[in-house]
Structure formats: structure tokens, C-alpha cells
């Protein structure tokens, strides 16, 4: 289960931690630079995890990996606290990580290893702890102008608000002094707020709550309230004061960070599924050396397609650019071998990946048996897009691969991997692919609709290795 040089190159550039563990003893097959740095540069590859990182014993880490290997069920990321030895052999250093463990299976579906991908969130956890400690101090600083200050009676009616509180709520002071705390609280947060408020009024027990206020325009704003009670001469709580911190930007950033982490996890899983399918295809080759060479070439094609999408922040790619990069190893820059013609077309990420892999396979076959196998032969790749008047409907794409000047063509007895990839591309476009095995040269035509969906697509080859 050795990790190829090409696959290593993909993970070497990954911003997250990545490691491949083999067998039930979780032997290190590969660890990317981020993971090796986390481990203080210690010797990893070829060693069982328990031997390489013995200080993890008793922290629940080994048991979690054993469970994933035993059941074959992936473990979705959640905050995990672990302690590691520092590089100089000093005391244990605490860290927090968000991990995803994905089982690696062979062609029979048996688990043979685990791919682990994680993100170091130690700084974020520490930052949140410091933020909570800082907010606890705000409860006694009523005169600050950088935070909202609101005081109510024990019935929740406002009796005092500062300018910042008015700004947070988007209301004037006179307006708020005629309202209650519940009237400006989001309906979904009222029940929990009431319970804590009543307990404070009865016992004097302070509390901290994250909740949403409602503004007059109907928008919601997230705040963190540090709430305490002020007692009268009789010892009973008479007033309740909240120091209000606007955390709306933090909540938005937190949601965005979760989205980005989930997106990264999604792409890593999709890439692994694709590589796994390519490996399964290579394993079926009658000649192991030829199968390995084809596998390496396909990984390189996948890597080149990823480079195109990465340069575009994975929001899509131009069809012409994706085609040129896919055909470059076969003389794509030579106008005598490839003639590309068509209008500007924007592909979604999943469509660009499918196109790149399909063109790589067609060019490979053409170089072995078709028009690229002889001098003077060439390929014409043309495409066109229908004029869609309705902007809500995706445009229709027509794409044609035509080989010219090659040896006489005979229709193969069985379907090859290239044919499956062309039909996989057509499936991505919601259309159909047809092959015309003309003696003068192979012709592939694809008709389909361009996707209107942004973002990364599903794994490309999960249905192509059967």
C-alpha cells in the first residue's frame, strides 16, 4: 500500500495534516510535512503508530483508529485533545485537532489501512478560552463604551442602556426604555434565556449566554451577554445588568471556517475515491508494468487538472484551458497534432475534472493506435454552446473529438476505459456520448447541459471501475 510519488506530491502541498496508516497495527506508510512537523521530526515511516508515538497511549487515540479499522466506518472530524512530547524530549505539550479518518479498502472491499486528515485548531481553542476569560471581566466594567450595557428590572424591562447597546439593537434609547428584554430577543432563543433570567432573579446566580437580538428591520445579530444581578438593601435581586459583546462577525467567521474545512474534507475524500478507482483499473491490467505505467499517467493527468482548478480557486475552469493542459503531454502545444476550436465555455469543477481525464484517455489511445501513432495524423477537438435565452437554465454543450490521418480504425471487441470515461463525462453533463468507429478515424460526440452548480463536484470514477 505504498504511496506513489505522484500522490505524495498532492499531499505535500495540502495545508492540512495528512498521514496514511497501513494494517491493523497502523504502520506509517506516509506522513506529509505538516504531520512530520507536528511530531517534532521523529522517525515515522515504517513504524507502527504505537511505537512511533507512544505518549498517545491512554488518550483514546489508538482505540479510535482501531475502531475505524475494525468497522470500516469513517470517523468524521470533531475536536480532539491530545498531548505530544516536544521535540527536545521535554514535557508533554497539549494540542487540539479536528480529524477525519477514512478507511482505505482493497478491490474486495477489505479494510487495509486508514487515511487520516486533520487540522490543528490549538490556536483557535486557546483564543476562545482567552476570549471567554476576557468577557467575564466585562461584567464589572459598566462604563465602557466599546461594549453594550443594559440593565433591566426583575421583570426584564429596560431601565438603563448605553449608546453601544442602542447601536447593537438598532433602536433609540427612548424606544428601548419602553421595551423588555424578551421583545428584542430572537424567538428561537427566548425559552433558554427566560430560564436563566428567572434563576438569576431568584438566586442571584450570574450566567453567560450567546443569543440573537432582533433589529427593527428583521435582521438578527449574535451577542454574548455576561449577566449578573444587583441586590437591594434587603439582599434581594432588584436589577439585572448585562454586558453585551457583539460576536456576529465571529459567528460568521466560525461558520465560514467550518464550511471551508468541510469543503477540504470533501475534496480530499473525492480525490481518494478517484485514485482508488484508478488503482483498481490498473490492477486489472494483464501486464502489471503496463498497468502501473497507465496508473502513473492517469495520476499525473489528475494532478494537472487539479492545478488548473487550484489556479481558479476551485470555482471552475475554462474548457479550452483544461483541454490544453490535458493534451500537453501528447503535443498539445503543436497545432499540427491538435486543433482546438470553440467559444469560451466555463466548466464547473466536476465537469473540468471529467473532461481532463477523458481527453487524457482518448489521447493515450490515439497515441497507441489512432491518428497520433503516425506522422501527419492529428485530432480535431471542437465544441459549441447553444444560445439559451433563459438565464436560469444551463446552456447546452456539444463537443466532438475527431481523429484524422491515422491508420484504418476497427471497432474494438470490448469497451475500454476511455469509453467509460467519455460516458462518465456525458453523465456529468446530464447528456449522452456516442462513438463512431469510422475507418478514417475515431469520432466521439458528447451532448449535454453545462452545470449551474458552483463548487467541487462528487467523486468522478466511483461508477467507472465496475
Image: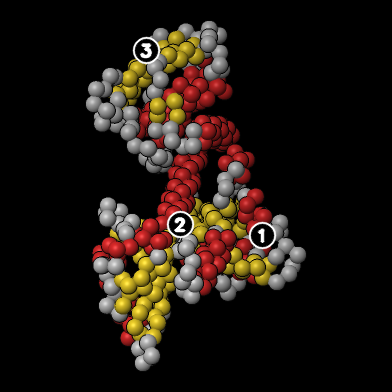
**In the image, 300: left or right of 389?**
right
User: Label 2 belongs to which residue?
Assistant: 250
Of residue 250 and residue 230, the one placed in the foreground of this image is: 230
Q: Secondary structure at mark 1?
A: loop
User: Label 3 belongs to which residue?
Assistant: 438
Q: CA distance from mark 1 to mark 3?
A: 59 Å
Residue at the right extreme of this rendering = 88
Hey, which quadrant is residue 255 in on the image? bottom left
Q: CA distance from mark 2 to mark 1?
A: 31 Å
Position of the C terminus by quadrant? top left
User: Label 1 belongs to which residue?
Assistant: 39
**Count of numbered badges drawn on the protein:** 3
**In the image, 418: left or right of 7?**
left
Residue at the front extreme of this rendering = 174
Badge nearest the viewer, 1 or 3: 1
Residue 444 coordinates in the image, percent (x, y): 37, 19
Of residue 66 and residue 396, the one placed in the foreground of this image is: 396
Q: Residue at x 28, y 62 (%)?
A: 175
Q: Residue at x 44, y 10 (%)?
A: 404
Q: Secondary structure at mark 2?
A: helix
Label located before the other in sequence (3 or 2): 2
Residue 114 coordinates in the image, percent (x, y): 52, 56
Q: Residue at x 58, y 74 (%)?
A: 58
Amino acid at each position: 500500500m505504498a504511496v506513489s510519488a505522484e500522490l505524495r506530491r498532492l499531499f505535500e502541498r495540502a495545508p492540512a495534516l495528512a498521514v496514511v496508516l497501513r494494517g491493523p497495527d497502523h504502520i506509517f506508510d506516509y506522513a506529509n510535512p505538516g504531520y512530520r512537523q507536528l511530531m517534532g521530526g521523529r522517525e515515522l515511516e515504517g513504524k507502527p503508530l504505537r511505537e512511533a508515538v507512544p505518549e498517545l497511549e491512554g488518550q483514546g487515540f489508538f482505540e479510535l483508529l482501531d475502531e475505524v479499522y475494525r468497522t470500516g466506518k469513517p470517523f468524521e472530524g470533531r475536536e480532539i485533545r491530545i498531548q505530544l512530547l516536544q521535540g527536545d524530549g521535554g514535557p508533554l505539550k497539549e494540542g487540539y485537532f479536528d480529524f477525519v479518518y477514512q478507511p482505505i479498502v482493497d478491490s474486495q472491499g477489505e479494510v487495509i489501512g486508514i487515511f487520516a486528515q486533520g487540522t490543528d485548531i490549538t490556536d483557535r481553542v486557546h483564543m476562545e478560552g482567552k476570549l471567554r476569560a476576557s468577557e467575564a471581566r466585562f461584567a464589572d466594567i459598566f462604563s465602557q463604551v466599546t461594549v453594550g450595557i443594559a440593565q433591566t428590572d426583575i421583570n426584564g424591562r429596560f431601565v438603563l442602556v448605553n449608546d453601544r447597546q442602542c447601536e447593537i439593537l438598532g433602536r433609540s434609547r427612548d424606544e428601548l426604555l419602553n421595551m423588555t428584554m424578551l421583545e428584542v430577543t430572537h424567538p428561537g432563543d427566548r425559552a433558554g434565556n427566560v430560564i436563566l433570567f428567572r434563576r438569576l432573579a431568584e438566586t442571584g446566580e450570574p450566567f453567560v449566554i450567546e443569543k440573537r437580538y432582533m433589529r427593527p428591520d428583521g435582521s438578527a445579530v449574535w451577542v454574548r451577554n455576561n449577566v449578573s444581578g444587583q441586590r437591594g438593601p434587603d439582599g434581594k435581586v432588584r436589577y439585572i445588568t448585562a454586558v453585551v459583546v457583539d460576536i456576529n462577525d465571529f459567528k460568521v467567521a466560525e461558520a465560514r471556517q467550518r464550511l471551508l474545512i468541510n469543503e477540504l474534507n470533501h475534496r480530499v475524500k473525492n480525490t481518494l475515491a478517484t485514485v482508488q478507482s484508478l488503482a483498481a483499473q490498473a490492477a486489472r491490467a494483464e501486464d502489471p508494468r503496463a498497468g502501473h505505467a497507465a496508473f502513473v499517467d492517469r495520476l499525473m493527468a489528475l494532478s494537472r487538472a487539479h492545478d488548473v482548478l487550484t489556479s481558479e480557486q476551485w470555482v471552475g475552469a475554462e474548457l479550452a484551458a483544461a483541454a490544453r493542459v490535458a493534451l500537453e503531454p501528447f503535443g498539445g502545444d503543436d497545432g499540427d497534432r491538435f486543433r482546438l476550436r470553440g467559444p469560451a465555455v466555463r466548466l464547473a469543477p466536476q465537469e473540468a475534472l471529467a473532461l481532463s481525464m477523458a481527453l487524457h484517455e482518448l489521447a493515450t489511445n490515439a497515441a497507441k493506435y489512432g491518428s497520433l501513432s503516425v506522422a501527419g495524423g492529428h485530432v480535431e477537438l471542437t465544441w459549441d454552446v447553444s444560445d439559451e435565452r433563459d438565464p436560469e437554465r444551463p446552456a447546452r454543450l456539444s463537443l466532438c473529438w475527431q481523429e484524422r490521418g491515422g491508420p484504418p480504425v476497427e471497432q474494438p471487441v470490448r469497451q475500454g476505459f476511455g469509453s467509460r470515461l467519455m460516458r462518465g463525462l456525458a453523465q456529468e453533463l446530464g447528456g449522452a456520448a456516442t462513438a463512431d468507429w469510422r475507418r478514417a478515424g475515431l469520432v466521439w460526440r458528447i451532448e449535454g447541459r453545462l452545470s449551474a452548480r458552483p463548487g467541487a463536484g462528487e467523486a468522478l470514477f466511483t461508477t467507472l471501475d465496475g
